[in-house]
Amino acid sequence: MSPLTSITLHHDYADALPELTVDWSAEEQPDPHLLVLNEPLARELGLDPEWLRSAEGVQFLIGRALPDTARPVAMGYAGHQFGQLSPRLGDGRALLLGEISAADGSLRDLHLKGSGPTPFSRGGDGRGAVGPMLREYLMSEAMAALGTPTTRSLAVVATGRSIPRAGGPERGALLVRVARGHNRVGTMQYTRLLDGEGGLTGRLADYVIGRHYPELAQARHPHRELFTAVAHAQSATVAQWLRLGFVHGVMNTDNTTLTGETIDYGPCAFTDRYDPDAVFSSIDHGARYAFGRQPTILGWNLARLAESMLPLFDDDPNTALEWAQEAIDAFPGIYTAARHASIGEALDVTADSPLVEAYLSLVQATAPDLTSFHRGLIPAAEGDDRMVLSSVTPEHHGAVESFVASWRKTSPDAATLARLHPIYIPRNHLVDDALRHAERGDLAAYQRLLAAVTDPFNASSQLLELVGPAPETFGPFITYCGT
Ligand code: AMP
Ligand code: MG
C-alpha cells in the first residue's frame, strides 16, 4: 500500500474559518524533480524521506498526490505593504495543503509556495524561481539552527517550467514550507475588513488562541491577552534578528505572523557590519525596513493589529480604545525588555546588568561584524581578545578592549557562549555564489553552505573559507524581491 494512505493531513483551519479560505489545488508540473530535502524535518513530521524522494513522494511534495481526506486551500489576508493598505492580498502563489501532527503532538501547516495561480494572484503567475526558493530554504533553515522562531523548509522541487522574470526566463521551482501557523497581522486586518461586527475577527482570535496560546483561553480577557502575547512573541523574534544582524527586508503586516515565527524570506540578508541604516532590498527606497528600524516597524504593525482587534478588547468602544492605546504604549517597554534579555543571554549576564547598556553603546559606536564579535567572546572569556578585536577596525580596538575587560570580570562561561554564538551564518557573498551555481544546476556550493549554516556552532576545518565577512571586492549587496 502507498505510504500516502497513512498520512493524515488535517483541514483544521479550512473547517474553522471557511470565510478566510478558498478550496484550491496545486497545478500540475511538467517535469518535477527534487533539488533539496530536509530529512530531519521530514522525520519530525512522520514522513519517510526515502519515499519523499520517490516519484510518488515528489508528487506529494508538489501537492498533486494527496491523501483522500486532504482539502488544500488558498488563505486570504490583507496587508500594509510599505505603509499602504491592500485590503485583499492572500496566497497568490501559495497553498495550505493541510496540517500534519508533528512528533511533539502539535499541528504544523504544510504549505506550498510557487504552486501556481490562485484566486488571489492579482495578475502574478503564481510561480517561484529556483534561486529565490533555494534562498528561502537556506535562510529559514539557518535561522532555525540559530534558534530563531521561524517557518521551516521541507523541500525545494524544480518544476520543469521556464518562468518569465524581469532579468529573463528562469527555471521554476516550488518551496514546501512548514510552520506552526500562517496567520498574520494581515489576516486579522482581513477579518476586520470583512465583518463590521467583529464576529469573524473573534473567531480568528479564538482559533489562534486555541492553537498557539491555549493557556490564554481561561484568562479574564483572552483577546486582550492574545494581543499582548503576540507583542511578546514578535519582540523576542525581532530582538533575535537584531542580535544576529538580520534584515528581514519586507516587514509588511502580511509578513508579521501571530505566532512570532519569521516568515517570507524574500529580500532578507545579514549585515556584515552593525549598521542601523543597512538596507539590502532593491525596492525599499525609503529605507522603511532598515536594520535599526525593525523594532519601530514591529510597533507600527502591532498598532495595525490593535486596530483590527479593537471590537474584541471590550464591548464598550471607549474602554476598548483606552485599552488599545495602553497596549500600544506598552510596546516599546516590551521590546526593550526582549532586547535586553537577548543581549544579557549573549553576554551570559543578567538582562539588567550595566554591561547590556554598555554593549548597546559599544556596537553603535564601533560597528563590529556582529558574528565575529559574538563568537570572539568565547576565547575572550578566557583572555584571548584577538578574534573580538578582529571584528572592528583598528581605531576601535581600545573601546572593545575596555568593554571586554570589564565584561570578563563577570566570569562568563565560555561553553555556554559556544552554544549560542554561531561560526557560520549565510553571509551575502556566500549565498550569492551558492545560488549563482545552483541556478546553473550545480548544487555543490549550496549544499556545503547549507551544511555549515544548519550546524552553525561546530567548527569544521573543511568549511573555513565560509567564516568571516565578505572581501572588500564584493562591494555593496542588493537583494531583489523573492518573486
Ligand atoms: P510576499 O512579498 O512574498 O510577501 O508576497 C506579497 C503578496 O504578493 C502575496 O499576496 C503573494 O501571494 C503575492 N505574490 C508574490 N509573488 C507572486 C507571484 N509570482 N504570483 C502571484 N502572486 C504573488
Ligand atoms: Mg508574504
Image (cartoon, rainbow, N blue to C red):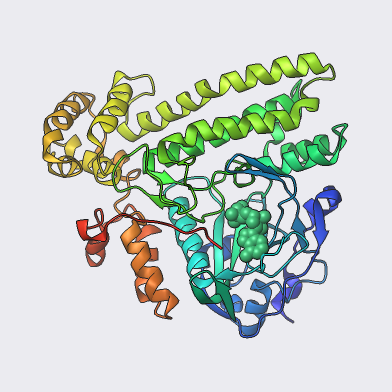
Asked whether the viewer can see residue 113, the reply is no
Across and down, in percent, residue 455 comes to 37, 57
Across and down, in percent, residue 271 comes to 34, 47
Compared with 33, 475 (above or below) is above
Q: Is residue 359 left or right of residue 42?
A: left
Q: Is residue 321 left or right of residue 151?
A: right
Q: Is residue 294 left or right of residue 466?
A: right
Q: Quadrant of residue 83?
A: top right
Across and down, in percent, residue 374 comes to 28, 41
Compared with 420, 328 (above or below) is above
Q: Quadrant of residue 127?
A: bottom right
Q: How many marks?
A: 0
Compared with 195, 454 (above or below) is below
Residue at left offset 23%, top offset 24%: 410
Q: Quadrant of residue 185?
A: top right
Across and down, in percent, residue 356 comes to 32, 25
Q: Nearer the viewer, residue 25 or 286?
A: 286
Residue at left offset 80%, top offset 54%: 21
Residue at left offset 50%, top offset 62%: 137
Quadrant location of the C terminus in the rendered image: bottom right
Asked whether the viewer can see residue 35, the reply is yes
Q: Nearer the viewer, residue 419 or 134?
A: 134
Quadrant location of the N terminus in the rendered image: bottom right
